Amino acid sequence: PNFFLSYFQVSTGAYKRQVHEVPLGKQVTDPTLIEKITWATWTSIIGDEVIGIWPRNADKADVNCACVTHAGLNIVTGDDFGLVKLFDFPCTEKFVSGYFILI
C-alpha cells in the first residue's frame, strides 16, 4: 500500500483552486483533507491561505503571481500595478496591507 500520497494544486481560469492526487490526477474535494496538506512550494494566488493578498476592490486579474519563501514564512506577490508586495504566510485575514518592495 502507498502510505505517502503526493498532491498538486492548480488555479483555473475561473479563479477556482483545484487539488489533485499524484500520479492519477484524481481531484481531491474534501476540504478537511486539503487543509492537512503541507505544500513543499506555493505559487498560487487562490486559496484560503492567501486571501489577504487581495486588496479591497481588486479585480480578479489584479494579482498575477505569488511565491512563498523557502522557509514558508512569507509570500511575495506581483500585480497589475507593477507592485511587488511582501506578506506573512499564511495570509488568511482579508485586505492585509503588505510591505512594498522597491525594485
Image (cartoon, rainbow, N blue to C red):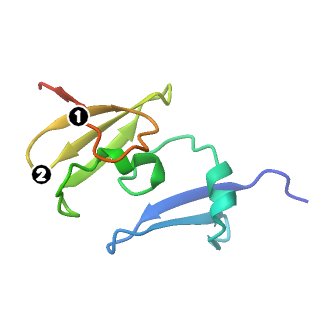
Pick the residue in front: 15 or 93: 93
Q: Is residue 56 above or below residue 25?
A: above
Horizontal arrangement in the rendering, residue 30 relative to residue 3 (left or right): left
Residue that badge 2 annotates: 80
Horizontal arrangement in the rendering, residue 15 relative to residue 98 (left or right): right
Q: Quadrant of the N terminus?
A: bottom right
Pick the residue in front: 56 or 6: 56
> Residue, x 17% and y 47% (percent of image)?
79
Q: Amino acid at mark 2?
A: Asp
> Residue, x 46% and y 53% (percent of image)?
48
Pick the residue in front: 88 or 1: 88
Horizontal arrangement in the rendering, residue 85 relative to residue 70 (left or right): left
Q: Secondary structure at mark 1?
A: strand
Q: Is residue 70 above or below residue 35?
A: above
3D distance between C-alphas at marks 1 and 2: 12 Å
Q: Residue furthest left?
A: 81
Pick the residue in front: 71 or 36: 36
Residue 101 disc label: none
Give how far across and how far down residue 102 sits, in percent.
12, 24
Q: Is residue 28 above or below residue 51?
A: below
Give how far across and how far down residue 3 sits, in percent.
85, 52
> Residue, x 23% and y 34% (percent of image)?
85
Q: Quadrant of the C terminus?
A: top left
In which quarter of the view is residue 93 placed? Answer: top left
Q: Amino acid at mark 1?
A: Lys
> Residue, x 56% and y 57% (percent of image)?
8
Label 1: how many residues lie within 10 Å, few (<14), some (14-19) or many (20+)?
some
Q: Secondary structure at mark 2?
A: loop
Horizontal arrangement in the rendering, residue 22 relative to residue 98 (left or right): right
Q: Is residue 67 above or below residue 28?
A: above
Residue that badge 1 annotates: 85
Give how far across and how far down residue 28 sits, in percent.
64, 69
